[in-house]
Image: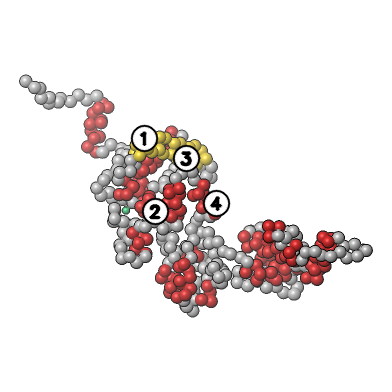
Amino acid sequence: MLYARLPKTLCDEMEKIQRSFLWGYTDQGRKPHLINWEVCCLPKKNGGLGIRRPHQMNEAFIMKMLWNLITNPQDLWCRVLYSKYCRNKDLRLSINSQPYDSPLWKALTDIWDKFQQNMVWQLGDGNTINFWLDKWMTNGTSLINSSSQTIIDTTLSVLDILNLVGDWNHSYVSENLTTSMTNQILAIPPPNELDVGEWQAIWAWRGPHRIQTFMWMVVHERILTNYRRSKWGIGISPLCNKCGAADETVIHVLRDCISATQNDRLGLAGCGGLLRNSDGNWLKGYSRKLGNCDALHAEMWGMYLGLDLARREGIMHLHVESDSKVLIDMVTKKINFKGNMPTLFIESPPGELQRILFDDISGTCMPRNVRLPL
Ligand SMILES: [Zn+2]
């Protein structure tokens, strides 16, 4: 039952035994079957007895194997089946069997159509879904037959059809697909990297509901930024009003914009970080309360304390990672500041100070002119 398709007659026979047992069949005679067998097989919450029908159980077991075959292709038994029966075909396009194939493979191919009809795609990050070949559309079809072009790249994943900010690439979609298909795709929320657990994390966060709602909209990229407004064709420039240097996307406003993240954002801050060895294993962590400062300064303190700690530990070869793009650009000198200049740490004394410092260390006396009030 677990790995071969049972003949229908066998399943019917098994059900007959189940029915007889339920209603008390004996050699002396047959007792009335008071409730329809179909009703008895319904789940208890729907008024039945929850009896599982052998035929459906058999199909469910085989579908479970198909599911494992797709989701865990690296398992040994999956690799054996793939190498033996795939015959250089893409399983997602067609799956078929020959008369001399094993009962297991025949059972899998028999159930494939039914399996696909009951399968719903969750886009996830879109990286493992083939844009043209997989049946990821809501109506369960693949896009390959809807292409308006004669030549298409069938290696593209759904992730490849997104632009830099994670929206559908309108021009690619409309150039390669019919208008109705294009509209259907644009109506589907583009994939993002959050899985179910991460969505739950937003709602499990203990804080004001309005901030939860805000985070939920941020993740959906539905904050009314200039970029979003321009996408909706309201005739607004997508550029950031504050810095004018980049499109005003959500991530720009909240993290990357120098002007928005520097101005008037003083608050209680802390910083922290960790050191890992080249295998990625934990060596040491650190954190510190900083008092009042803005986000960029907190990031700078974080990096400084980390570098200091690494030096004290005698670590000479170090890769530094930070999630502050501004800080990284500052350190790698890719950035020019206009206006409000943040504090910079100076590693070696500037030229004009070097002589004074030298004099101080060597104890040189220097005459000074002092004006005395008379
Ligand atoms: Zn900006």
Question: Which residue, as the protein is rendered here, is positioned at the far left?
Answer: 374
Separation (CA) of disc 1 from disc 4: 34 Å
Q: Which residue has dot 3 on it? A: 274
Q: Which residue has dot 4 on it? A: 197
Q: What secondary structure is found at the residue carrying circle 3? A: strand
Badge 3 vs badge 2, beta-carbon distance below 8 Å: no
Q: At which x and y percent is residue 265?
A: 33, 43
Q: Is residue 285 visible?
A: yes
Q: Callout 4, which amino acid?
A: Gly
Which one is earlier in the sequence, the residue at label 1 or at label 4? Answer: 4
**Looking at the image, which is closer to me, 232 or 49?**
49
Quadrant of the rendering where the C terminus is positioned:
top left
Q: Nearer the viewer, mark 4 or mark 3?
A: 4
Q: Which residue has dot 1 on it? A: 291
Badge 4 vs badge 3, beta-carbon distance below 8 Å: no
Q: Callout 1, which amino acid?
A: Gly
**Looking at the image, which is closer to me, 190 or 287?**
190
Q: Is residue 17 visible?
A: no
